[in-house]
Amino acid sequence: MVARSPAQTPGLIDRGLRWLLRLRFGQAPLRFALADGVNLLVPSGPPVATVLLRDRSTLLRLLMHPESAFGDGYSSGRIDVRGNLVAALEAGYRAIEGDAKKPRAFRLYRGHSVRASRANVHRHYDVGNDFYRLWLDEQMVYTCAYFPNPESSLEEAQMAKMDLVCRKLRLRHGERVVEAGCGWGALALHMARNYGVSVKAYNVSREQLRHARDRAWREELAGRVEFIEDDYRHIRGRFDAFVSVGMLDHFGLENYGALSTVIDRSLDREHGRGLLHFIGRDHARAFNAWVRRRIFPGAHPPTLSQAIEGVLEPADVSVVGVENLRDHYAKTLAHWRLRFEQSADAVRGRYGNEFTRAWRLYLAGSEAAFRTGSLQLFQVVFARAERQPVVWGRDRGDSNGVS
């Protein structure tokens, strides 16, 4: 047997790595290269970007655990993308799309007890109001906007989204509304100011509640909007409308029964109706592993069937409208990402380079996921089965958003 010289070994390793790369990303218009100048994978056509890896061990980790290794590698600088980051991520998602849609079992990611949910929220939302103020709209709305036309500003689109929610709920002056997860309070204040309702809004983020209560006091709405620091499972009282925007994907599948119980006991038996606005999937599978670990602990985007069967069917309500705003979320994220980049130096100065790169990747990856259809944004309107609101048309002013 002829022994291989040390000089031959890297060549054999590179051939093996090229073969593995081609298996996973062979159809993607991406160039993969090592920092030492070795090209590992070159597409047949023009590449949309170059993925530059510091060394072979980084590449090996990427091949073994692509989601976690790419996120950690990009954040730390061991992986870089030369070219359009969103386009590169879109290409990667499309290359592995077939594998992602295969039926598979997935774990219930636990950690959604009252105490764990509070810790999860704290990790993401209590980074600091000043951080989010750098790149969100003026009202600090951190959920999908609705763009009446492509030229609408982010501020206009977020106002349009809040009006869309209120019209779908068919709010009337004097009604009582409960909101599960209220962010920085924009929707609760909008409902009270523009639709004449009283609102109880539940949240466990102290940073967000501090901002929301300050706004309510300054805008003289504190008597009509009550911001409550408590978990949604502790909601008590009867209400005409229940609304949850951007929270269902954080509740955890194992807690859908508890949410269903809350909706059932909270909604008025005769006139009760509600709206769930949430990130979802077409196929049942877990959230991106890196995002779940580093950015959004405990997150899980449900399918429509999981949301309806797990939350709404047991709550004795009927679904009266479903709409997918996926394209609107991709556009929302493009606005956030641009504003984030304009503030990147300020973010880096306060939080460091690794934090800045992680959030850049998170925003770009989320935009790519909605553009490719890996993620969806559902709005589901529901009402008590015995007294559904009459809907005569499908225009925005007189419908529940049936699509």
Image: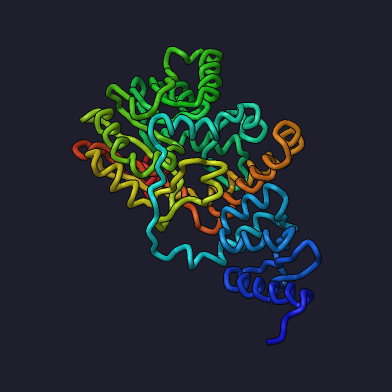
Question: Which of these two is toward me, 25 or 37?
Answer: 37
| Whole-percent x, y for residue 213 in the image | 51, 17
At horizontal 61% and vertical 27% (from top left) the residue drawn is 128
The residue at the point 50 percent across, 57 percent down is 373
Q: Residue 145's x, y, as percent?
A: 53, 40
Q: Residue at x 41, y 58 (%)?
A: 283
Q: Nearer the viewer, residue 252 or 164?
A: 252
In this figure, which colouring scheme has been used for the structure?
rainbow
Is residue 354 something one can see in this rendering? yes
Pick the front one: 181 or 143: 181
318 to the left or right of 363: left
Number of residue marks: 0
- What's the residue at 47%, 21% (across, down)? 193
Res. 397 visible in picture: no
Q: Quadrant of residue 228?
A: top left
Q: Is the N terminus in the top left, top right, bottom left or bottom right quadrant? A: bottom right
The picture places residue 285, in percent across and down from the top left corner, at 42, 55
In the displayed orientation, state which residue is furthest to the bottom: 1
Q: Nearer the viewer, residue 263 or 328?
A: 263
Quadrant hosting residue 383: top left
